[in-house]
Amino acid sequence: MRSLVSTLGSFIWSIADQLRGPYRPNQYGNVILPFTILRRLDCILEPDREIVRDLAATHESPNRLRIEVKRATGRPFFNTSKYSFANLLQDADGLEDNLVDYIDRFSADVDVFEYFDFKKEIIALEKAGLLREIVKSFGAVDLHPDVVSNADMGDAFEYIIRKFNEAANETSGDHYTPRDAIRLLVDLLFAEKDAALTEAGIVRTLYDPTAGTGGMLALAEEHLLAQNPDARLSLYGQEYNPQSYAICKSDLLAKGHDASNIAFGNTLTNDAFKGRQFDFCMSNPPYGVDWKQYAKAVTKERDEAGPYGRFAPGLPATSDGQMLFLLHLVHKMRAPEDGGGRVGIIMNGSPFFNGAAESGPSNIRKWLLENDLVEAIVALPTNMFFNTGIATYIWILDNTKHSERKNLVQLIDGTSFWTKMRKNLGNKGREISDTDRAKVLRLYADFTDADPDFSKVLRNDEFGYWTITIERPLLDEDGKPAVDRKGKPKPDSKKRETENVPFSYGGSTAGPAGKAEVIQAYFDTEVKPHVPDAWIDWAKTKTGYEIAFTRHFYKYVPPRPLAEIDADLEKQVAKILDLLREVEG
C-alpha cells in the first residue's frame, strides 16, 4: 500500500487507540471513516471558504448558489457553515452542536454522512468525552489531494475497512477487490479499444453496479488518463452498503465528478440507471450469495419486461446471484449501432457449469454464446482475494467483436502468473505483478492456440451439448420386451439413463444444426454396441451449454512408480515404529 502503511496507517491506528474502551474494534470504522471523509472535504474546501460564504450571503436559491460556486471555484459541492476544522475547537462548549452545523451545511449532493449515521456517532463521542480529542487529531492531519493522492486515499479507506473487519473477525469481501486484480481487469476491458481511447477530447462512460468503495472506477479512470490526459470518463455506480456508498461518492466528489452518478440501493431490485447504457461496464459481484429475499421482485420484473428485459435469458438458482449481475451488465452495454459496449466481470467457477441442460444457468450461457457476446475468460491465481482462496475468473464480453474474434471465445490460463507476497493479507498470499499482468495481456493480444498450455481459442458451439435420454425395454414375466397398444416397446424407467453429446462430437462443425446426425453417430458408436436393445427418446432431448475451463487445460501427470511409493511407505512405517519404541521405552 505504498507509503500509506507508515503514514496514514499509523495515524489511523492512533485514532483507534483513542477509541479503545468505549468502542469495540468492529466499531472503529464508524468513527474513523466519516471523520476521514469530512477532513478530506474540509481540506479541499479551505482555500475558497470565504468566497463561498460571501456567495451564500448573496444568493438564497440553492440552485443559483450551486451555479455561482461552480463558476467561482470549479467545484460541484460546497459548505456554507461558518465552522471548519480551523475554528471548531475555539468554542469548546459548543463543539458538538457546531460540528453538526458544519455537516448540515454541505450542499445537497453531499449526503454521505447520513449513511454513516454520523450525528449519532458525534453524540456518542461527546458522551464518552472523546469528541474534542478526535476533532483535534483529524484537524492536525492534511488530507488534501495534493498531499494524499486519490489512489492513496482509496487505499486508506479500504485499509480501514479491512483492518477493522479483521480485528472483529469479520470478512471484507463485499467491500474490497485487490488492486492488482482490478488492474488486470481494467487492462483487458480497455484492450480492444485502446487505439480509439487516445483520440483528443474523447468522452466515455463507465459503470459498476457493485461499486463498493469505488476502487474499480478509480483505477479505470487512472488507466484512461494515463493514455490520454485530455480524455473524459464519466463514472457511474450503484452500491447497497451504506458505508461503501458514502466512501465511493465522497471519492468522486473530491475528484470533481458528478456525484449524482453514484446511486444507493440494490441493483437487482432497483436499477438506478434504468434505460441507460454505457461504453464500459465492470463488476466484482458477491459470490454464492443467496438472493431468495429478492426472488419475488426479480421474477416479477423478468415476467413483466418480456424478451428484452435484463433477466429474460434465464434465472440462476436462488443460492447464487452472481449470474444476475452478469445479465444486468450485458443489458447495460451500449448498443452495437451506437458504438457497442464491453463488460469485465470477476466471478468464481460455478457460472461455467451450474445447472443442467435447459436450466436457468445453462440458458444464460446459451444466450451469451449464441449471441456471440463472450470474448475471453481468464483464470486468475488462487489466494488472490482477502476473504477467500477459491478460483476466480475474469470474463470479458463485447457486442462488437473484431472480425477475427467473431464466433470465438479465448480461454487464458493465468493461474501460474503470480508473485508471492512478503506478508499475507487475510487469504491473499499472491499478487499479480506488472510482469505477470503483461504476460496475460500478451496472450490476449496474440489471440492464438500457439501456446496451448496457456491459451485456447474455441468456437462458440464447442461449449454446447445435447442431453439425450436412453431408454431400454421393460421386460415381462417371461423376460420378453413388453409392448404398448401400438406394438412399441415400453421403456423401463429403472434402466433409463442420460448422456451428454457435444455439438462437436466426432469432429463435427455443424453446431446445433447437426443435431440428429451427431446424436445418432454418438448413439451408434458409444451406446448401441454395449446395449443393443436401447433406443433414444428424441422427445426428451435437451440443449445445454457449459464452459469446462479446467478440462481444456488439463495436463496428464503419470502416477509415480510403485517402487517409489513402496519406498516412501517403508520410510513412514520405520518412523512410526521408532516413535512407538520411544513411547514403550
Image (spheres, rainbow, N blue to C red):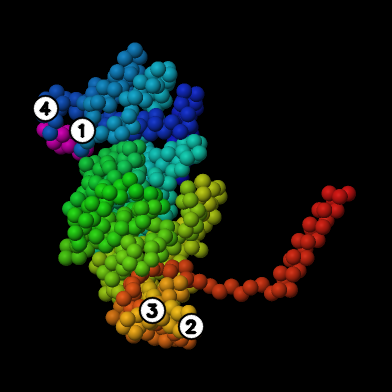
First in residue order: circle 3 vs circle 4: 4
Q: Which residue is mark 4?
A: 59
Residue type at the position of mark 1: Ala
| Disc 1/disc 2 C-alpha distance (Å) | 86 Å
Quick one: SS at disc 3?
Answer: loop
Badge 1: residue crowd in 10 Å (few <14, some 14–19, many ≥20): few
Q: Which residues are magenta?
A: 64-75
Q: Which mark is residue 108?
A: 1
Residue type at the position of mark 4: His
Quick one: SS at disc 2?
Answer: loop
Residue ID at (25%, 34%): 110
First in residue order: circle 1 vs circle 2: 1
Q: Position of residue 257 (x, y in %)?
A: 24, 43
| Image depth: mark 3 or mark 2 in front | 2
Query: Do the residues bearing badges 3 and 4 touch, measured as CB atoms within 8 Å?
Result: no
Residue type at the position of mark 3: Lys
First in residue order: circle 3 vs circle 2: 2
Front residue of 478 and 338:
478
Q: Position of residue 554 (x, y in %)?
A: 50, 71
Residue ID at (15%, 26%): 56
| Image depth: mark 2 or mark 4 in front | 2
Badge 2: residue crowd in 10 Å (few <14, some 14–19, many ≥20): few
